[in-house]
Amino acid sequence: MNASGGLRGMAWDHPRARNPLAAISAEWSRASGVAVAWDARPLKDFEDQPLEELAAAYDLVLIDHPFVGVAATSGLIVPVDDWTDPAFLADQAAHSVGASFPSYTWAGKQWALAIDAACQVSAVRSDLWAARQFGALPDSWVDVLDLARRTHGTHGQVAIALNPNHAYCAFLSIGVSLVGESFWPAATCVDRPAARESLEMLRQLAAQVHPGSRTDDPIGISDRMAGTAEILYVPLMFGYSSYARAGFRSHPLTFADAPRGRAGRHGSVLGGVGLALSARSSQRAAAADLARSIGGSQAQSGIYVNTGGQPGHAAAWDSPRANAQVGGFFRATRRTIEQAFMRPRVAGHRQFQPLAGELIHRFIWLGESSAETCLQAFDRLVDALLWNTAHRAVV
């Protein structure tokens, strides 16, 4: 959708997204003769911006998997099945990291290539941790709360990304760590006792953690942690392997599994990025060829990871060479991403997530209501936007 005849794509604004796309596109352009321009939007817009706006302006769009219900029912996205062969799709499915590939599957079709795999994990400044002589990293949420209390008010605190969208994800993650998948089965409400316990844990943590936790997203927390000595440990935020790379910031971060709850599960929410082809593209063949180049195993385990990306293909996650570039990030967090919880993908989730996030954020930080009142309001949002008759038909 470029007036000059080239392709336009929309990423999100971080080197993890921009750099590998630019590098692969440059190689592809030299071979094809077709120019490619990538724009980038802030993380908040990646999480919330309507797909309708993006599909109208771009040939290729990076999307979050909760948008799949909209993609499948709106006619805005061309199914991947229509522009790849069965062998390519079979390779993608066989080498999915956790549920990254199936998170973009809907109604028997694939709606995006899982070019980037991520979930919430823990992170530590190893140099600061060693200086404090704390020993092993926290294994449970009880351990996390104890550490937060011990470090509260000191230089080198616990932090956790708890702005509205990420407060919602943290609420789900702790709940899943407590009771597993039964925390929120499709077409039901969340498990009330586990949800109450999750909310109370987050409220207790909010009183003890670094104040930036209230407004920062994972990029903000990671930048603050890598650039200052203010933050020692983060129990839960979407992992960015960029920060484990030598020289990316002043101090590298070391990543590990998320804490466990009573269920023995490393509670986490699946993230990552899917590459989708707009149905409004006037150059579908060229856009599809570029997308296959970005998502293929050779690029994913080569140029994609070499230029700072966080691949979605297991060929990279399994690679000793790739792990060496990111301080063992892939190996250290693999157990968590294999257990990560998939958020609802029905069409109403786009409206639901920011509203639920604001509700939980107010409870955690402002104490405006009891946990029960908060959960009653959460259930009303679920009934109104997720599992009502109109949305249930496409689950």
Image: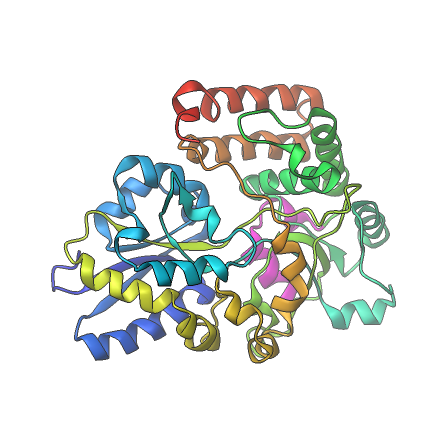
Give residue 299's position: percent from left, percent from top: 40, 73
Q: Is residue 253 left or right of residue 128?
A: left
Q: Is residue 392 above or below residue 266?
A: above
**Vertical position of residue 356 compared to residue 97: above or below:** above
Q: Residue placed at 59% from the left, 42% from the top?
A: 169
Where's residue 319, x and y in %? 57, 75
Taking the image as shown, residue 280 lies to the left or right of residue 81, namely left
Q: Nearer the viewer, residue 205 or 178?
A: 178
Residue 273: percent from left, percent from top: 44, 55
Towards the viewer: 102 or 69? 102
Residue 214 falls inside the magenta stretch: yes
Whether 236 is drawn above or below 350: the answer is below
Q: How is the image coloured?
A: rainbow
* Residue appearing at x 56%, y 49% in the figure: 270
Is residue 180 found inside the magenta-colored segment of the image? Answer: no
Q: Which quadrant, please, contains the N terminus?
A: bottom left
Q: Nearer the viewer, residue 320 or 329?
A: 320
Residue 13 is at least partly visible in this image: no
Residue 279: image location, x then y, percent: 22, 47
Could you tell me what secondary structure mostly forms the magenta stretch? Answer: helix
Residue 188 shown left or right of residue 80 in the figure: right
Residue drawn at the location 70% of the way across and 24% of the way down: 192
Residue 302 vertical position relative to residue 106 in the rendered view, above or below: below
Query: Quadrant of residue 283 in the image?
Result: bottom left
- The magenta stretch spans which residues? 210-226
In the image as oriented, which residue stretches furthest toward the left? 4
